[in-house]
Amino acid sequence: MCVRVIKPTHRSRLGSRHSASLPAVEKWLRLVRYARWQHLADARRVFPHADAVEVASGNTVTLFNLGGNAFRLITAIHYRTQNIFILRLLTHASYSKNTWKQEL
């Protein structure tokens, strides 16, 4: 089973806020479409800077650096079911404020 990205149409909404991110988001979508990840180490083979972070809810999210480190894509990866939920797309500046951790 390949990874399924939940709400891939969400990218148009993401792009409306951060149009410069669209090429990077599209590339990310192409790369994850056929992934068969079982854990973070698998994701890091494709995206070496992917990182797992615990947020206020106690859940763990996975961060991807996109667009030459200009953007952060925050996702919830459910390895067992092979689903990825796109949660947020932030500029590096917004990400650095760390307020997003309290929202998730």
Image (spheres, rainbow, N blue to C red):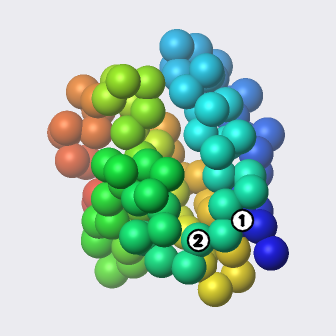
Q: Tell me if mark 1 has few (under 14), some (14-19) or many (20+) residues whose alpha carbon lies within 10 angstroms of its own.
A: many
The residue at the far top in this view is: 20
For disc 1, the marked residue is 3
Closer to the camera, 53 or 79? 79
Check the image and report above or below for 48 versus 76.
Answer: above
Residue at the image point whose x is 71% and y is 65% from the top: 3
The residue at the far front in this view is: 45
Closer to the camera, 103 or 76? 76
Closer to the camera, 12 or 47? 47
Question: Residue 96 in the image: x percent, y percent?
Answer: 19, 38
Looking at the image, how many numbered discs can be counted on the residues? 2
Question: Residue 83 in the image: x percent, y percent?
Answer: 69, 69
Q: Is residue 44 left or right of residue 36?
A: left
Residue 92 seen in the current view = yes
CB under 8 Å between discs 1 and 2: yes
Q: CA distance from mark 1 to mark 2?
A: 7 Å
Image quadrant where residue 26 sits: top right
Residue at the image point whose x is 19% and y is 39% from the top: 97
Q: Which mark is residue 37?
A: 2
Check the image and report above or below for 29 versus 36.
Answer: above
Q: Tell me if mark 2 has few (under 14), some (14-19) or many (20+) residues whose alpha carbon lies within 10 angstroms of its own.
A: many
